[in-house]
Every structure is written in structure tokens, then in C-alpha cells.
Amino acid sequence: MNTETAIQVHGLTKSFGDRKVVDDVSLSVEAGEIAGFLGPNGSGKTTCIRMMCGLLTPDAGTGRVLGQDILTQQGAIKLQVGYMTQRFSFYEDLSIEENLNFVAGLYGLPRGAVRDTLEDLGLTSRRSQLAGGLSGGWKQRLALAACIMHKPRLLMLDEPTAGVDPKARRDFWDEIHELSASGLTVLVSTHYMDEAERCHRINYIAYGRLVARGTVEQVIADAGLVTYVVTTDRPGAVARRLAGAPGVEQVAPFGTTLHVTGTDADALQATLRANGVTYDPTETSLEDVFIRLMDQSQDNMG
């Protein structure tokens, strides 16, 4: 990956009415990197993305995206960014090709841009199909085509795989990695843990505040959690007994086993022994870490 910084923002803050949706967020993304932007619904991810791609002015904070100032050069940022929103936002009564022709007109692109984009993303055979009749996966591919047709240097994708099947999600991520390998920088928001693990680095936001960042391995290590898998034929009863016991911070069912997590290994093991259960150490998952981060964060809805 390139060592140039594509996104560098400091102290981003945004309120709507009395609610502070984004609270002092600082973020750095290197050129050519796939950066994950994670957090639950309502955590402020979309608002952050809109501030960074020039669609929303922060109440406080500074920064540069692709070398352009987010406060004074928003127009220049928009021209170099491809932004894919959560919702499908194209004309459903127009074909794939007609929708792309419309986007090409907005950017003043040459005639061949649509043809090349259709070919690059495997849409040529479907170019006459109405957008409204597409499956979730093909709508997603159309949206991606529209985002990259003007050859942006940065892609900002806001939960791009919501509502699509597992194969379409896999194909989409393969395409994202190909684009990254060609030098494109990608910031993608998601709440799917398997997608987070496909990012080069991740940034986790909870209730408007950035609470963790780094590679997946770094974020898991920094959490300081230990996890044991408990084997039992009565997982429901054992889970109720362990919940809130000394050393136990989380209990999560996994089929007929339980994943029991905490930060104090000695106290956790003592509780498991006292309850007479069979347990073995296992790797702490990203999901375990994120649930703990949510539990530690303060809700900003009040």
C-alpha cells in the first residue's frame, strides 16, 4: 500500500438539534487502503462519511481528504470521490445503461465511459434490463459502477452489502480488493464482522465516538479479553447461571456451546470451575470485542 494519506481528519463533531451525532472523531486512511468503518446502526458512521466526502459541513473539526480541505474545498472533494449510499438511488424505470448514461452526463464523461464500465463490472449483457427489476446483488453492482465510472481516487461505501445474499457479498468484496490493488482507496462502513475482517484496518465508532482502531489483530489484542468455550447439554441454564458471575463479562451461545468472555482470566476460570462446567480456551472474536466496546460506551440518544 501507498504511504500517502488519503483521509486525515481531526475532531469531527456534528449535532442535529440537541443530539451530538458525531463527537470529536479523528481518522486517518492511507492511500490504497481498505479501511473499515464499523459500528451499530445509529452510531454516526453515515454522518462522518458525509462530512468527509463534502456533503455535510462539520460543526467543529478540521481535515483533508485527497489533499483538499473539508471545510473550504468540498466541491473539489466531490469530484474525486465515489460515494455509494445505503439505499439504491437510481431510476428504476430506466435501464442499467440509461442510468449510467445519466451519471456520465453529470460528470461530462466521454461516450466510451459507460461502455467500458459495463464491461469492467460484467454488466454488458444486462445493460438493457430495467434497474427496478434487478436483484439486490445486481443493484449493488450498478451502484458500484456509477461510483467508479468517473475514475475517483477514493471510494466511500456506506453499508454497501445490506440486503444482498452471501454470494453477492463475496463477489462484491472480491471486486473491492481488485480496485484497491489498482490503487483506489476505500472507506467502507459495515456491521458485518466477516466484512470487517477483510479490511486492512478498522475503525470502530459507538454512539458518535471513535473507540478503537487498527488491524483486526491489534483491535482484538488491545481489548485484553480472554475467551473460553463451554461445552454443555444445557446451554440456556448454564448461560443464566454464569451471566454476571465474577470474571464473566459476556456469555454468548454458539450452537450447543457457550463463549464466555472476560478480562480477568483467573476470576473467569474460578467461576467456570465453581460451576462444574467443561471449558477450553479459544480465540477471542471481533464480535466479542465489539460487544464489549458497545457495553462500555455511553448512549448519545438522551
Image (spheres, helix red, strand yellow):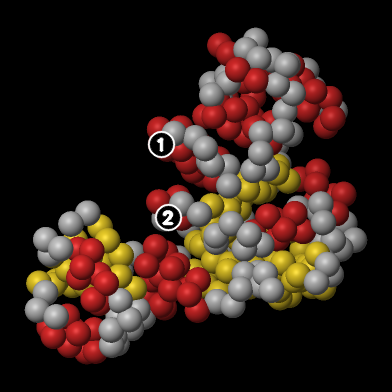
- Helix, strand or loop under label 2: helix
Residue at 55% over, 60% down: 40
Q: Is residue 178 above or below residue 18?
A: above
Residue depicted at 78% across the width and 28% down the height: 103
- Quadrant where the image shows the C terminus: bottom right
- In the rendered view, tell whether residue 177 sits above or below residue 24: above
Q: Which residue is mark 1?
A: 166
The residue at which mark 2 appears reads as: 193
Q: Residue visible at 46% across and 55% down?
A: 196
**Residue 163 point in image, percent of width and height:** 52, 37
For the residue pair 294 and 174, the one nearer the viewer reads as: 294
Of residues 155 and 211, the one nearer the viewer is 211
Decide: marks 2, 1 in contact (CB < 8 A)? Answer: no
Q: Amino acid at mark 2?
A: Met
Q: CA distance from mark 2 to mark 1?
A: 13 Å
Residue 112 visible in the displayed image: no
Mark 1 belongs to which amino acid?
Answer: Pro
- Under tag 1, what secondary structure? helix
> Total number of numbered labels?
2
**Residue 289 picture location, percent across and down:** 40, 70
Can you give x and y, in whole percent of width and height, for residue 256 in the image?
A: 18, 57
Q: Quadrant of residue 50?
A: bottom right
Q: Residues within 10 Å of mark 1 (few under 14, many from 20)?
A: few
